[in-house]
Image (cartoon, grey):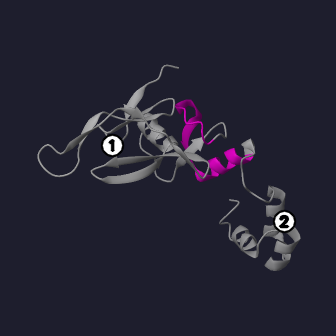
């Protein structure tokens, strides 16, 4: 696959992102200090992402304001368009650090959770059978929590269908 670079949406002229998941800062002059000639050259360079909650994140800066972005979101936005309402970025192979465009897609939260289960990267403590058992049970929540080794809050969220969708 040949590397292709596209501007980062809303950061055109400042940053670009590639289909291989790299983000680069573009060469430019920025205001630095006071006076007419108070400018500093920013050289073009590949940004070094940091790991945050399992995802690679970069900090982008413009007009003395900075913001952190997931690299996967930047790649998806540049190559697949703006995030459709209600969708989130999915890593199709289960590796949240693989930000190549062929590994990314917009999808629902449910699809993302199913991907995590499929790839074994889910932090879920209960199986779907245990979730079904909780939802059908007439036992008290604290009894179910003790029986399954989770918190009462987890049982409450399962019964309210706010987790384990």
* The residue stretch that appears in magenta: 96-117
Question: What residue is rendered at 45% in x and 36% in y?
Answer: 80
Which of disc 2 and disc 1 is earlier in sequence? 1
Residue that label 1 marks:
11
* Residue 120 position in % (x across, y down): 75, 45
Quarter of the image where one finds residue 142: bottom right
**According to the image, label 2 marks what residue?**
133
The kind of secondary structure element at disc 2 is helix
Name the residue located 51 percent from the left edge and 29 percent from the top edge. Answer: 20
Asked if residue 128 is positioned above or below residue 73 in the image, the reply reads below
Q: Residue 15: image x %, image y %?
A: 36, 38
In the picture as drawn, the residue positioned furthest to the top comes out as 2
Q: Residue furthest left?
A: 36
Q: Nearer the viewer, residue 151 or 26?
A: 26
Q: Secondary structure at mark 1?
A: loop
Q: Which mark is residue 136?
A: none
Residue 95 appears in which quarter of the rendering? top right
């Amino acid at each position: 696959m040949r590397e292709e670079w596209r501007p980062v949406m809303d950061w055109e002229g400042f940053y670009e992102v590639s289909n291989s998941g790299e983000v680069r800062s573009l060469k430019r002059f920025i205001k630095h200090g006071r006076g007419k000639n108070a400018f500093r050259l920013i050289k073009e360079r590949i940004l070094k992402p940091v790991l945050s909650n399992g995802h690679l994140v970069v900090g982008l800066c413009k007009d003395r304001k900075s913001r952190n972005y997931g690299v996967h979101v930047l790649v998806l936005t540049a190559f697949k368009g703006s995030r459709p309402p209600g969708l989130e970025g999915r890593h199709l192979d289960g590796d949240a650090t693989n930000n190549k465009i062929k590994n990314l897609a917009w999808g629902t939260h449910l699809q993302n959770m199913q991907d995590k289960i499929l790839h074994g990267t889910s932090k879920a403590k209960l199986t779907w059978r245990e979730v079904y058992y909780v939802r059908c049970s007439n036992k008290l929540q604290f009894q179910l929590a003790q029986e399954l080794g989770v918190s009462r809050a987890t049982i409450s969220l399962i019964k309210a269908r706010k987790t384990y969708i």
